[in-house]
Amino acid sequence: MSLKKLLCLLPLLLAPGLALAHPGHGDNGLVAGISHPIGGLDHLLAMVAVGLWAAQQQSAARWALPCTFVGTMLMGGLLGFSGLELPAMESGIAASVLALGLAVALAVRPPVSLAVLATALFALFHGVAHGLEIPEMTSPWAYAFGFVAATAALHAAGFFVVRVLPQAAALLVRLAGAASALTGAWLLAG
């Protein structure tokens, strides 16, 4: 199968997951965990942006950013599950969409330590938000597995797009980052 056909099929593969994001689907845990990052625009954009941004980096940052996000998000999920709420959590999530989109749009390459710190901060907000939903689930561990797996898959999708597309498509990736940043600004204003 050619890359062009594969990219054309990608939206069709993700479409059923969007339908599961509506209330009443997946309260068994796993399906809800998978659908949350895919069905929420703020989460979807931030998760893909981490993969896009990681692919724009060099050496250790390529794997450090997605691993940091997933690990910190899981720790945040445990904090949320225990009842911790972060102040301005929704604003923090919206700010992550804005900042990660800008990082992709501008192809920013900060020192790895700074990129990891920013990624961890954003992941904490997303993780706590996921964790606050866990108590309602009949299977909290399945939910956690679902949101971690979906997050990793979205990171991989963003990374894959940047690494597989020809260099000439770099402008499209940066435009996608700008669109994500604009959406983050809109979410912050709303």
Image: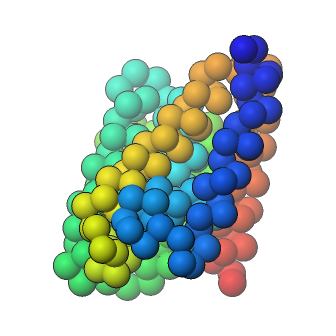
Residue 1, compared with residue 134, is above or below; it is above
Counting from the top left corner in percent of width and height, residue 66 is at 40, 41
At 44% across and 83% down in the image, what residue appears?
A: 88
In the shown orientation, is residue 81 left or right of residue 182? left
Q: Is residue 59 visible?
A: yes
Give the total number of marks visible in the rendering.
0
Query: Relative to the observer, which residue lies in front, 75 or 54?
Result: 75
Instruction: Name the quadrant of the N terminus.
Output: top right
Q: Is residue 42 visible?
A: no
Residue 143, compared with residue 172, is above or below; it is below
In the shown orientation, is residue 114 left or right of residue 50? left
Please, which residue is most extreme toward the left here?
82
At 67% across and 42% down in the image, what residue appears?
A: 13
User: For residue 108, what is the image quadrant?
Assistant: top right
Residue 99, compared with residue 50, is above or below; it is below
User: For residue 63, what is the image quadrant?
Assistant: top left
Counting from the top left corner in percent of width and height, residue 153 is at 49, 41
Counting from the top left corner in percent of width and height, residue 140 is at 27, 68
At 35% across and 26% down in the image, what residue appears?
A: 60
Query: Relative to the observer, which residue lies in front, 148 or 161?
Result: 148
At 69% across and 84% down in the image, what residue appears?
A: 190
Counting from the top left corner in percent of width and height, residue 85 is at 32, 83
Query: Relative to the observer, which residue lies in front, 69 or 17?
Result: 17
Residue 46, compared with residue 166, is above or below; it is below
